Image (cartoon, rainbow, N blue to C red):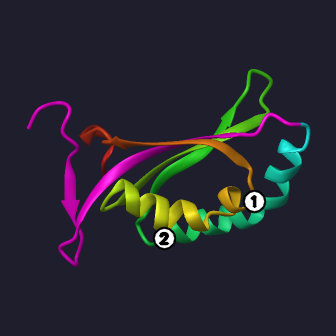
């Protein structure tokens, strides 16, 4: 396995699961923070439920230099990038509420030293 290969693991259903890094930046319009704050409670509940199912490994807000939330990052585990888009993003309140305006999904691997 070379350094560019995404390590995967098997679930109890023997489905191949890979990790993906989602970076999502909020809009830059004057209502962006209001949209974020309105959707935030539902987004956090959604992420919490996905974490309980083992779909979200870690996540949090991206901050600007003044500490204002301007985006999000998540590490998720799904069989494919398409599954991330269809099963996670398509139902996330931040995505549905048009909070996130720029979203990138990339294969990712949490370093073994951080896996417990």
The stretch drawn in magenta includes residue 22: yes
- In the picture shown, does residue 105 fall above or below 88? above
Q: Which residues are magenta?
A: 1-29
Quarter of the figure that contains the N terminus: top left
Q: Which mark is residue 52?
A: 2
Residue 107 found in image quarter:
top left
Q: CA distance from mark 1 to mark 2?
A: 23 Å
How many marks can you see? 2
**Along the viewing direction, whichever of 67 and 32 lies nearer the viewer:** 32
- In the picture shown, does residue 6 fall above or below 15? above
Find residue 45 and report its horizontal and vertical position in percent: 66, 68
Residue 105 as seen in the image, left or right of residue 33: left
| In this view, the mark in front (1 or 2) | 1
**Along the viewing direction, whichever of 28 and 34 lies nearer the viewer:** 28
Q: Is residue 89 visible?
A: yes
Location of mark 1 (residue): 97
Q: Quick one: label 1 or label 2, which is nearer the N terminus?
A: 2
Residue 39 found in image quarter:
bottom right
Residue 14 found in image quarter:
bottom left
Q: Residues within 10 Å of mark 1 (few under 14, many from 20)?
A: some
């Amino acid at each position: 396995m070379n350094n560019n290969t995404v390590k995967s693991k098997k679930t109890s259903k023997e489905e191949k699961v890979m990790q993906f890094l989602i970076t999502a930046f909020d809009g830059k319009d004057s209502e962006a923070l209001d949209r974020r704050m309105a959707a935030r409670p539902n987004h956090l509940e959604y992420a919490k439920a996905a974490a309980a199912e083992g779909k979200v490994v870690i996540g949090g807000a991206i901050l600007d230099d003044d500490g204002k939330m301007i985006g999000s990052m998540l590490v998720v585990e799904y069989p494919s990038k398409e599954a991330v888009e269809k099963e996670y993003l398509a139902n996330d309140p931040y995505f549905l509420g048009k909070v996130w305006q720029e979203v990138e999904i990339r294969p990712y691997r949490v370093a073994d030293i951080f896996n417990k």
